[in-house]
Image: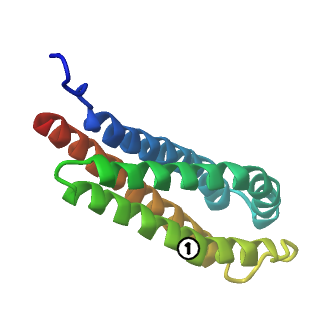
Amino acid sequence: MTAGSKPRVHHAWWVGGAALSAALYAGFRINECLGTDLVLAKEPAATALAFLHVLNSKRTPAVLIMVIATLGAAALAVHKARPRKLAVIGLVLLVVEDVLTFGLHVPFVLALESKTADPAPADWSALCSRYIFDDVSRTVLLLAAAIVFLTSALQTEKRT
């Protein structure tokens, strides 16, 4: 570095942080798919609904923290990425995932939790399938966002 020159800023690290944040959130979602979704698919309604009641209250703070951290990292990535196109796509994927989560999945889960397990709801199989579809589709969006941000970070590194 010569006298008077600015230190080189590695913008790719900021974009990589968005990839890491999205990947961590996706990992949480995969855990959800392998945990709650299997309970819903394999256990009787009484067991599955009791599991949902216990688990949902415990995971809500973690989900909110991950949403805020991931969106914050993504917004910073859009600012730092060169070119910005991929980072914008990653941010859009995250926003779509969050809209699906808070606009469709959360109301669905709250309605599901209000169901009584004895007797099991007549449409229990359809409810479980919808829950699992919601989880898997939102997880795919998060994985896609992580891949897009990683690709953006690699392109940014080549340009800085």
Left or right of residue 33: residue 60: right
Give the position of the C terminus as an image quadrant: top left
Give the residue drawn at x 59%, y 68%: 131
Q: Position of residue 133 (x, y in %)?
A: 49, 68
Q: Give the percent coordinates (x, y) of residue 147.
A: 29, 47
Q: Is residue 20 above or below residue 142?
A: above
Dividing the picture into quarters, in which one does residue 141 lie? Answer: bottom left
Residue 78, image x, y percentages: 31, 54
Q: Residue furthest left?
A: 159
**What's the residue at 47%, 48% (across, down)?**
26
Image side of residue 7 versus residue 107, left or right: left
Q: Quadrant of residue 130?
A: bottom right
Q: Residue at x 67, y 54 (%)?
A: 39
User: In the image, what residue occupies the spot 54% across and 48% down?
Assistant: 69
Residue in the foreground of this view, choosing between 109 and 88: 88
Identify the image's colour scheme: rainbow, by chain, secondary structure or one colour.
Answer: rainbow
Mark 1 belongs to which amino acid? Answer: Arg
Q: Position of residue 135 (x, y in %)?
A: 53, 61
Badge 1 marks a residue whose secondary structure is helix
Residue underneath mark 1: 130
Instruction: Locate residue 1: give its quadrant.
Output: top left
Residue positioned most to the bottom: 122
Q: Crowding at label 1, few (<14), some or many (≥20) Cα neighbours within 10 Å?
A: some
Q: Nearer the viewer, residue 84 or 58?
A: 84
Q: Which residue in the rendered view is the most extreme toward the front? A: 4
